[in-house]
Image (spheres, rainbow, N blue to C red):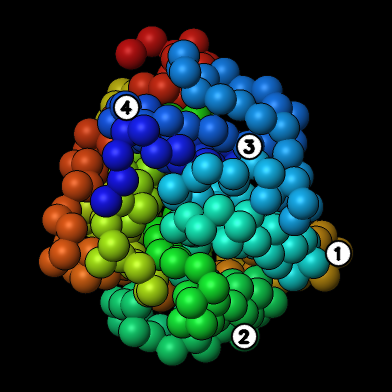
Amino acid sequence: MTSNNDLHVIFGSGPVGKAVMNELVSKGKRVRIVNRSGRLQVKEGVEVVAGDATDVNATRVLCQGAAVVYNCTNAPYTQWPQKFPPLQAGVLEGAVSAAAKLVVMDNVYMYGPTGGLPITEDLPYKATGRKGRTRASMAEELLSAHASGKVRVAIGRASDFFGPGCRDSSAGERMFVPAISGKTVRVLGNPDLPHTYTYLPDIGRGLVTLGERDEALGRAWHLPSERTVSTREFIGMICRTAGQAVHIQAAPGLLIKGMGLFDPMMRELAEMLYEYEEPFILDYSNFESIFGNHSTPLEEAVKETAVWYMDQHKQPV
């Protein structure tokens, strides 16, 4: 267990890093958040520091005195194999130098297609795409470091996330902005298949729980994601909040793959199409059995996010 006097260091000030910061602040913890610029609007008492997570010498200094280190960094989507492993390596060495717990934000790409079966933590890593293989290799490195006694690690995994302030996600502004505006929402794959979406504050709460509890160490956990609905139902909740009709257009997989021949981002999306062409259901029962279910009711989470977008785009509530 950690106390309020312990220092918690967060690498990455994107949506996940901010969610962890907010959860720690709500618990009265000492927080240092690290990003490249050293600038971030935060609550009083939070220390914001500039730093390069790939620089081992820098991370060792930045982690000095930390009880828990959170790796919430991300790499450009088209450059994961090149840029993600160095981020992890730098943060890991920082945590090692401080003898701190290391809590890592992860996703579920490493499992690859499951044929529609629920996604559980004991699935083998069968990803064939380069992003999934990168995630698998990084997870194996973390768990190997824990098993060797080099560092104490816990991994938290979530599905596609959404929430106030989250723009760059399949359930980010590309979905919410047209939905609240009464325009057509363009989606990948089949919108009538079940697809789990994870609320950002629940991710923050889950990662902090992993940092607090020694039972979490040495393995990966799927974070609570409330109930799973179809993408069409999810978009319908957004539209109801905004008082708009539902308009959805599914992009054919062949079109995405064809565009990927010329567009690097489309190529990366094409690699992940399977997530939208089969049921994509995250099972978090292991987390729930040990730590409880803290997930926010889906309707409430979607409404809070839609209202945030409406405020950003000056839409009347």
Residue at 38 percent across and 43 percent down: it is 204
Residue at the spot x=50%, y=45% of the render?
Answer: 66
Question: How far is the residue under mark 1 from the one under mark 4?
Answer: 49 Å
The residue singled out by tag 4 in the image is: 28
Q: Quadrant of residue 238?
A: top left
Q: CA–CA distance between discs 4 and 2?
A: 43 Å
Measure the C-alpha gap from mark 1 to mark 2.
21 Å
Separation (CA) of disc 3 from disc 2: 33 Å
Q: Amino acid at mark 1?
A: Phe
Q: Which residue does the numbered mark 3 point to in the structure image?
A: 34
Quarter of image, res 160: bottom left
Q: Position of residue 221 (x, y in %)?
A: 34, 67
Asked whether 118 or 31 is in front, the reply is: 31
Q: In the rendered structure, which amino acid carries the disc numbered 3? A: Val
Q: For the residues marked 4 and 3, what is the alpha-carbon distance in whole angstroms? A: 19 Å
Callout 3–callout 2 Cβ contact below 8 Å: no
Which residue, given by chain and number where applicable, does mark 2 sit on? 128
Q: Label for residue 262?
A: 1
Q: Residues within 10 Å of mark 2 (few under 14, many from 20)?
A: some
**Labels 3 and 2: the sequence-earlier one:** 3
